[in-house]
Image (tube, rainbow, N blue to C red):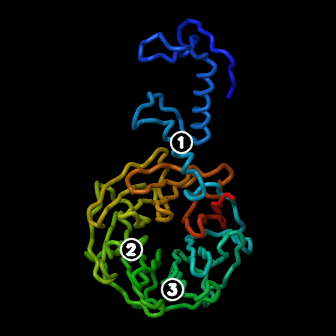
Amino acid sequence: MKAYSTIPNTTGTFPDTEADNASGPGETDGTPFIKQLIDDLWGARQALMDRLGLTPNGSQEAVGASQFLDALELLVRRNPAFGANWDARTAAGSYSGIFRDAFYSPDEYLWCIVGDSGEIQTSDSDGDTWSAQSPAGSYSGTFRGITYSPSLDLWCAVGSSGEIETSPDGATWTQRTPAGSYSGNFYAVHWANSMFVAVGTGGEIQTSTNGTSWTAQTADNSYSGTFWDVTYSSDLSLWLIVGASAEIQTSPDGATWTEQTSAGSYSGAYVGCAYGNGVFVIVGGNGAKELQSSPDGSTWTSQSIPSPGGTSYQDVFFANGHFFAPLSSLGLHVSADGANWWRIPYDSGTSGLSDARALGYGNNGFIGVGSSGTIFKSHKHG
């Protein structure tokens, strides 16, 4: 900002007059400031909003409705802990397919990402250099979910054609047989409460306590659509799965499931679910975006989607005290409580994240994966 040595005392009409530091509204007893100084202050605020991708709405700043405050909050949040400062990383073997999921094991200091054509790649905790691993049995289908069991020291990946594979180290994989000779597509797998739960097409739910032997469970109300995601609340001791046609089901043990009713009239597909800070969050995708939250898995509330809203969500997960939902090229939607959301735009040059399929969090940073072999890392400063 410019430095001024004098403050002239002139008169005029806005915007040619100086701003008076008066004792109250309408008073003329204050010392006038020169217009250039006020312009500097206004210009600095406008530059901040512009840099953060905010458009002035033309409304007067007020308590509880301040875009400048919004900009300051976004500036604070726009750091690696909230998924910013993205850098591209190179997939091993010039892989150009779609990566579908990413997970980090703090026990093994290992990242594992999976995708189309039976692709499995691993990296140490920094997420910089990636190595291709071979799936079991020359599997060439689509892996869609990956997770890790700390107590079993075991990775588990699931995919199309009923594929289930496990590994003790992310490098050596073994095919497992799903219950009932299931040959549909598994879309997600989650480890919690001493159990793997995998879900997929045809209302499929399968559980395993060891990753080797699997048991088919029955969805409530004869649901036969596609389950897209699964999560667990240790606070509530409650599993949650979501799927097509706005399906929501909960279970205390992974075996007995109860259908729940979402809020409003949304009838699209719920493609992601997560739990944290005492609340479940589910997101809608497949071209029909939706955000809903619940404190107990049974009573749901539709939440406002921050602008710009984009087309649909791909995923949602909880890490570092916040929910994160990737939204095409527009960046991330972030919330601490599942009700109040803000947007963090991707940095310029991260166009590869425009089709982000999943995000993982570990070692104080994010890994984002998507189409065309995309791997992006949200790095730490210092």
Q: Is residue 90 toward the left or the right of residue 224 in the image?
A: right
Q: Quadrant of residue 173?
A: bottom right
Q: Earlier in the sequence, mark 2 or mark 3?
A: 3
Question: What residue sits right under mark 2 in the picture?
Answer: 232
Q: CA distance from mark 2 to mark 1?
A: 34 Å
Spot occupied by residue 64 in the image (x, y as percentages of width and height)? 39, 38
- The three-letter code of the residue at mark 2 reads Tyr
Tag 3 secondary structure: strand
Q: Earlier in the sequence, mark 3 or mark 1?
A: 1
Q: Nearer the viewer, mark 3 or mark 1?
A: 1
Spot occupied by residue 343 in the image (x, y as percentages of width and height)? 51, 49
- Residue 294 has which mark? none
Q: Nearer the viewer, mark 2 or mark 1?
A: 1
When the figure is inspected, residue 62 is found, relative to residue 92, above or below; the finding is: above
Labels in figure, total: 3
Image quadrant for the C terminus?
A: bottom right
Tag 2 secondary structure: strand
